[in-house]
């Protein structure tokens, strides 16, 4: 588990991935938490209170589904190309870091702005494309959105 909000500093190189982990193995062990990696939940039997995974069957007293989020990728040609990424996970962040050169970021919401700024910090030529009337229109009014655009331009984001 890691702090997803800190993916932008990892992308820009300001932080190392190991520094955004929430807890180390000792923390889980001290609290009696068993972390299972590499298993897929395949079925839930509500009556038997069991979860069937790719490796075992587990019983529960309380079951919580913590599934994360799924990014929305516009249905445009090329959206599934190997050099096109979403920016939601550490694995995606590492894949983006493994490429260099010009970058285009689609979406001027919080994650898009952060990704563009992080890529520009690494010296990449970055273009940010946003469909809204100004950047982060859900969080900012027009004046603040235009000020953000100016600040990003000063960092080399067009």
Image (cartoon, rainbow, N blue to C red):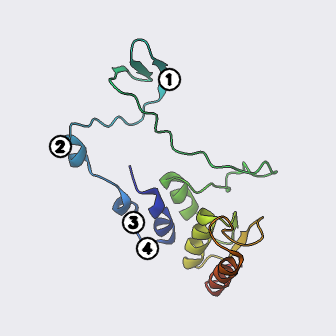
Q: Which quadrant of the structure image shows residue 132?
A: bottom right
Contact? badges 1 and 3 (CB < 8 Å): no
Q: For mark 3, what is the residue?
A: 16
Point 48% across, 54% down: residue: 90
- Where residue 28 appears, x then y in whole percent? 24, 43
Lower sequence index among marks 1 and 3: 3
* Vertical side of 134 occupied by 32: above or below: above
Lower sequence index among marks 1 and 2: 2
> Is residue 60 shown left or right of residue 4?
left
Contact? badges 3 and 2 (CB < 8 Å): no
Q: Residues within 10 Å of mark 1 (few under 14, many from 20)?
A: few
Q: For mark 4, what is the residue?
A: 14
Q: CA distance from mark 3 to mark 2?
A: 25 Å
Q: CA distance from mark 1 to mark 4?
A: 38 Å
Q: CA distance from mark 4 to mark 2?
A: 31 Å
Lower sequence index among marks 4 and 2: 4
Point 71% across, 71% down: residue: 128
Q: Residues within 10 Å of mark 2 (few under 14, many from 20)?
A: few
Lower sequence index among marks 1 and 4: 4
Lower sequence index among marks 3 and 2: 3
Q: CA distance from mark 1 to mark 3?
A: 33 Å
Q: For mark 1, what is the residue?
A: 42
Which dot marks residue 30? 2
- Where residue 53 appears, x then y in whole percent? 43, 23
Q: Residues within 10 Å of mark 4 (few under 14, many from 20)?
A: few
- Where residue 67 appears, x then y in whole percent? 50, 39
Point 42% across, 21% down: residue: 51
């Amino acid at each position: 588990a890691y702090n997803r909000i800190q993916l932008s500093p990892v992308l820009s190189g300001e932080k190392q991935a190991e520094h955004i982990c929430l807890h180390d193995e000792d923390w889980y062990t001290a609290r009696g938490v068993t972390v299972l990696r590499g298993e897929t939940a395949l079925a839930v039997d509500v009556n038997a209170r069991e979860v069937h995974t790719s490796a075992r069957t587990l019983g529960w007293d309380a079951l919580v589904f913590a599934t994360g989020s799924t990014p929305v990728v516009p249905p445009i040609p090329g959206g599934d190309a190997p050099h096109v990424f979403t920016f939601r996970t550490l694995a995606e962040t590492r894949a983006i870091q493994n490429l260099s050169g010009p970058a285009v970021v689609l979406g001027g919401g919080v994650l898009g702005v952060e990704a563009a700024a992080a890529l520009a910090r690494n010296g990449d030529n970055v273009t940010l494309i946003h469909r809204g009337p100004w950047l982060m229109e859900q969080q900012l009014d027009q004046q603040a959105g235009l000020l953000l655009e100016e600040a990003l331009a000063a960092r080399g984001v067009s």
